[in-house]
């Protein structure tokens, strides 16, 4: 049979498409595919129709079909036809654009003088378009992804054993970049992960694999949530949405929308974030999609917290926890347990707060994911100093900071660093506290965090005998409108103590009276600091005959001090960390830090 397309004659011979007496440079499936379109009389052929003929009794991905389609397109282009001669009909399949006529007989032979030129052209086309064999099958690739997701420690030696080099098939190169990027991400190595993923996408010559590209862009967006480059974050979200749209992956599109809600959060657009997440939640509830409901509630909790909606914040975490335990989903259970432990801590329910912090840590340790672990670990190590477990707190806070420095040096654990300063101050390790303070203040900080660090610095200066420095630093903090309640309390304490030592009677009196008129922070350390300040002022009062606070007699202060010590001891006993959990934690920390 002879087929004519735009005056180009093609001949079918033994399931092969010939032109000018030579076979087109196609694989067997490429020839079979082209013949299907030549015989289709310009009808649209669906993907299912093509797959059933080209891969009988086999289940293959869209990528495999797209590869054959591209092969046929190249061959047709080599004959001088339009590159989109074999066009995609959206939502239906593929179709030859030009009219095809078929008839029996012998094809017209080209001029003999052109035959050598045509043969050379065909050889050149074959050389240029020959396929490089794929090393990774779809199944092998998915198995690798699943094994990294379940336990990244299986692949800490890398992926050189796959044998994918720079001259490998473009699909293999892109998949390798995804595998390496995901593995680095799971280990907490954001810089390495970003390098693999961005490099793979920028250098990719793969014509398909939209699903892989979507996953890579979404993973990049998750990491750039914590970076300042908001334009790049938005670009990754847009690219992920586009590629998921091509594949029709509704789950991927929903996950991208959730990350877009997080984008609104980092932009401070909390109402927009809440509106988007509530829309996602309503759709998920209608579809009985428990996983998406859980993700929506978890992210809504943060927006509620930042919007000052405390009741909604607690409800959202309770809803997340119920869903996570029902699925089960250890990661979200850990996050909710941890967040609720902070709520109980603020309410003074120390025993329940520690129990929930330990549950958060337990679930995170099961995940074998450094990023998830750091989040769950944070609830535990931030709980320790608040319950008076100072030695453990000192140890674990430092290790958390070391993990951050090793795997993601661009980010900082500000809460951990401030808590470590508090712990060292409570332990009277003022040199150690100064070292942490200097490292913290050497970086760019927002105004509120900087003032809190400076307030600690003022107190540290007093403890080290530099009362002039303590006095001036405390005054500077108190004069700044960006000072939060914690910083204000610490700075006033430092000012009162340093002014007393500098014999500035009126200023000591004024700052102490200011402190007595304000509510005190609820933390155990802050309560102890206040009682010590009262003790110091009483001693000063005896020497100056200043009537600072007649209600705070020495007898009353002694009683409060005794009650405080008794309560502190009781809380330490009630919140003693589980020894078995500590053993598992120490083993995990040793493995990831060695």
Image (cartoon, rainbow, N blue to C red):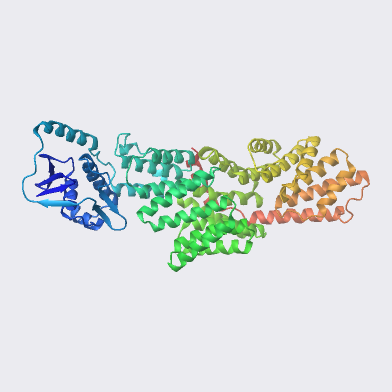
Reply above or below: 79 against 255.
above
Tell whether 190 sits left or right of 158.
Answer: right
**Residue at x 88% of width, y 53% of height:** 549
**Residue at x 29% of width, y 52% of height:** 88
Depth order, front residue of 439/229? 229
Q: Look at the image and tell me whether residue 249 can be seen.
A: yes
Reply above or below: 353 against 401.
below
Tell whether 74 sits left or right of 370.
Answer: left
**Residue at x 66% of width, y 57% of height:** 346
Residue 523 x, y percent position in the rendering? 70, 53
Q: Quadrant of residue 398?
A: top right
**Residue at x 45% of width, y 53% of height:** 256
Depth order, front residue of 543/286? 286
- Counting labels gives 0
Reply above or below: 334 against 205.
below
Residue at the bottom extreme of this rendering: 286
Residue 478 x, y percent position in the rendering? 77, 45
Residue at the right extreme of this rendering: 545
Depth order, front residue of 441/448? 448
Q: Look at the image and tell me whether residue 336 can be seen.
A: no
Residue 143 x, y percent position in the rendering? 33, 49
Tell whether 49 sits left or right of 440.
Answer: left
Residue 6 x, y percent position in the rendering? 19, 46
């Amino acid at each position: 049979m002879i087929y004519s397309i735009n005056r180009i004659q093609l001949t079918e011979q033994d399931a092969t498409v010939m032109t000018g007496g030579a076979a087109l440079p196609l694989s067997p499936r490429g020839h079979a595919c082209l013949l299907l379109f030549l015989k289709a009389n310009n009808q649209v052929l669906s993907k299912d129709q093509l797959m059933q003929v080209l891969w009988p009794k086999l289940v293959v991905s869209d990528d495999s079909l797209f590869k054959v389609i591209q092969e046929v397109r190249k061959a047709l282009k080599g004959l001088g036809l339009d590159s989109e001669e074999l066009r995609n009909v959206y939502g239906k399949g593929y179709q030859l654009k030009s009219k095809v006529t078929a008839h029996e007989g012998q094809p017209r032979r080209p001029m003999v003088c052109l035959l050598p030129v045509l043969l050379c052209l065909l050889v050149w086309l074959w050389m240029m378009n020959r396929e490089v064999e794929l090393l990774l099958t779809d199944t092998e690739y998915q198995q690798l992804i699943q094994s990294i997701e379940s336990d990244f420690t299986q692949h800490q030696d890398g992926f050189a054993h796959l044998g994918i080099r720079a001259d490998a098939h473009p699909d293999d190169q892109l998949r390798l970049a995804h595998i390496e990027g995901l593995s680095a991400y799971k280990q907490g190595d954001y810089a390495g992960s970003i390098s693999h993923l961005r490099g793979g996408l920028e250098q990719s010559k793969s014509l398909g694999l939209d699903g892989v590209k979507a996953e890579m862009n979404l993973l990049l967006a998750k990491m750039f949530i914590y970076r300042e480059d908001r334009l790049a974050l938005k670009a990754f979200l847009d690219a992920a949405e586009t590629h998921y749209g091509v594949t029709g992956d509704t789950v991927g599109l929903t996950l991208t929308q959730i990350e877009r809600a997080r984008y609104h959060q980092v932009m401070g657009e909390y109402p927009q974030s809440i509106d988007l997440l509530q829309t996602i939640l309503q759709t998920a509830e209608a579809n009985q999609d428990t996983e998406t409901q859980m993700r929506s509630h978890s992210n809504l909790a943060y927006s509620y917290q930042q919007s000052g909606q405390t009741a909604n914040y607690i409800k959202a975490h309770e809803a997340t926890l119920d869903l996570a335990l029902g699925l089960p989903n250890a990661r979200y259970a850990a996050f909710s347990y941890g967040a609720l432990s902070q709520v109980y801590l603020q309410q003074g329910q120390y025993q329940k707060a520690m129990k929930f912090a330990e549950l958060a840590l337990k679930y995170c340790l099961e995940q074998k994911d450094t990023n998830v672990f750091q989040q769950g670990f944070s609830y535990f190590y931030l709980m320790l100093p608040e319950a008076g477990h100072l030695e453990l707190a000192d140890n674990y806070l430092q290790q958390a900071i070391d993990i951050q420095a090793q795997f993601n040096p661009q980010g900082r654990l500000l809460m951990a660093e401030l808590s470590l300063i508090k712990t060292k101050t409570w332990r009277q390790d003022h040199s150690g506290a100064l070292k942490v303070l200097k490292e913290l203040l050497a970086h760019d900080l927002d105004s509120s965090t900087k003032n809190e660090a400076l307030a600690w610095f003022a107190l540290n200066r007093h403890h080290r005998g530099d009362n002039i420095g303590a006095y001036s630093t405390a005054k500077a903090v108190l004069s700044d409108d960006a000072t939060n309640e914690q910083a204000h309390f610490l700075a006033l304490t430092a000012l009162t103590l340093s002014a007393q030592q500098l014999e500035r009677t009126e200023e000591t009196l004024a700052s102490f009276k200011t402190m007595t008129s304000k509510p005190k922070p609820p933390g155990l350390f802050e309560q102890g600091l206040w009682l010590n300040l009262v003790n110091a002022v009483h001693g000063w009062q005896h020497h100056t005959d200043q009537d600072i606070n007649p209600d705070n007699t020495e007898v009353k202060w002694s009683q409060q001090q005794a009650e405080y010590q008794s309560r502190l001891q009781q809380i330490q006993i009630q919140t003693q960390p589980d020894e078995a959990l500590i053993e598992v934690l120490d083993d995990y920390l040793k493995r990831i830090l060695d």
